[in-house]
């Protein structure tokens, strides 16, 4: 295998990376879009146009940083789903065009699978992350527990029945008059606050299974804020509510993950990934939980928690390796269309042996 170039454009971050066959990161670039800030969330049309404007120069810049000519690449990969369809079309289209122009295979990457396999990047887990392990995926659009049993082999154990954790952070940040994205803003304000005077519920805590619910928690925050007139929320109250909300999310997630571990006693590792996995309070709570179960806990470095092309390139490498291990030809996904939904369970299909 030669180096692989990867593109990520499933939401509002435009990213490109080049990885060596062993996973060494030769270059990585991420451009975060600011055009959504006035709207308090991602506007798909704005995101797609920004990807289209940024990607050509970003690819050239990433090749320059890696000091590689395009001809030295062995494959091209891109997130092809799930995500915002406009952004996926732009990124996958650029990647397919490069693949055709260079005569290289194109590897379509499932964005969720890329998060799931990030922990296996060389150097992230001492001795390597071996299968099976439990993945907690927490982001603005996803909140689920997944049994990761091998490359292409995943079982969803539970997920949110309403809001994702990151979505709840964004909505609470808006209630508190903070900026977007809400996760970092709420975490920063929570450091100033005392949660004790502002108790909040823990939806589904203690219930069987490992589904999540954050809608009721969001409503409870709104009720705490209701007595305050617009613009009259004292800083101490805002900080206390932010701290209480963050504690509640950490408690809910830790409880749900504990139940998921009960459902997956063979797990050798607990992994957290996605943008909300960057939250310090949540990482601390999950570390404590893993220690109580005599399991190691792993989370990517902060820059690899949010959407990035490094994880896309690594997922492509893992896919190519697994197909080679199974005696299958290298994948070439030029005919695979971007899709807004792409269940992880379908990833096993790419490793099925062709009929004789």
Image: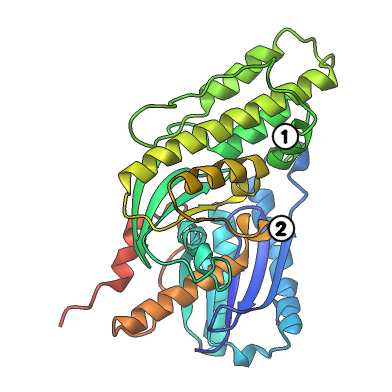
Q: Is residue 93 above or below residue 261?
A: below
Q: Residue at x 50, y 48 (%)?
A: 291
Instruction: Pick whichever of labels 1 and 2 is earlier in the sequence.
Output: 2
Helix, strand or loop for disc 1:
helix
Instruction: Give me the C-alpha separation between circle 1 and circle 2.
Output: 27 Å
Indicate left or right for 350 with 138 as reference.
Answer: left
Q: Residues within 10 Å of mark 1 (few under 14, many from 20)?
A: many
Q: Residue furthest top?
A: 227
The label shown at residue 50 is 2
* Residue 51 position within the rendered picture, expressed as x and y whole percent measured from the top left: 68, 61
Q: Is residue 37 above or below residue 300?
A: above
* Residue 231 position within the rendered picture, expressed as x and y whole percent measured from the top left: 84, 17
Helix, strand or loop for disc 2:
helix
The label shown at residue 186 is 1
Q: Residue at x 52, y 63 (%)?
A: 119
Q: Residues within 10 Å of mark 2 (few under 14, many from 20)?
A: many
Q: Residue at x 41, y 80 (%)?
A: 321
Q: Quadrant of residue 6?
A: bottom right
């Amino acid at each position: 295998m030669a180096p692989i170039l990867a593109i990520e454009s499933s939401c509002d971050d435009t990213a490109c990376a080049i990885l060596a066959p062993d996973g060494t990161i030769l270059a990585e670039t991420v451009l975060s879009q600011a055009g959504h800030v006035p709207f308090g969330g991602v506007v798909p049309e704005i995101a797609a146009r920004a990807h289209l404007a940024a990607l050509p120069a970003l690819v050239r810049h990433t090749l320059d940083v890696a000091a590689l000519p395009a001809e030295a690449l062995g494959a091209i990969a891109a997130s092809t789903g799930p995500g915002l369809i406009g952004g996926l079309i732009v990124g996958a289209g650029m990647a397919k065009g490069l693949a055709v122009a260079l005569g290289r295979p194109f590897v379509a990457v499932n964005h969720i699978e890329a998060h799931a396999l990030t922990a296996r990047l060389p150097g992230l887990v001492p001795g390597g992350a071996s299968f099976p392990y439990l993945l907690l995926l927490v982001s603005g659009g996803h909140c689920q527990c997944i049994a990761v049993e091998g490359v292409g082999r995943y079982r969803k154990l539970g997920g949110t029945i309403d809001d994702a954790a990151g979505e709840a952070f964004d909505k609470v940040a808006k209630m508190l008059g903070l900026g977007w994205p809400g996760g970092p803003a709420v975490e920063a304000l929570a450091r100033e606050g005392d949660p004790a005077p502002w108790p909040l519920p823990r939806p589904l805590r203690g219930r069987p299974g490992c589904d999540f619910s954050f809608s009721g928690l969001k409503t409870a925050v709104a009720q705490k804020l209701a007595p305050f007139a617009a613009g009259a929320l004292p800083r101490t109250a805002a900080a206390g509510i932010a701290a209480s909300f963050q504690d509640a999310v950490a408690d809910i997630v830790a409880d749900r993950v504990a139940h998921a571990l009960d459902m997956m006693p063979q797990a050798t590792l607990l992994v957290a990934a996605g943008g909300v996995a960057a939250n310090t309070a949540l990482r601390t709570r999950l570390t404590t939980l893993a220690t109580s179960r005599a399991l190691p806990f792993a989370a990517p470095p902060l820059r690899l928690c949010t959407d990035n092309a490094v994880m896309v390139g690594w997922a492509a490498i893992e896919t190519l390796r697994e197909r080679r291990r199974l005696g299958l030809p290298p994948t070439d996904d030029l005919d695979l269309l971007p899709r807004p939904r792409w269940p992880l369970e379908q990833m096993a299909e790419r490793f099925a042996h062709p009929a004789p």
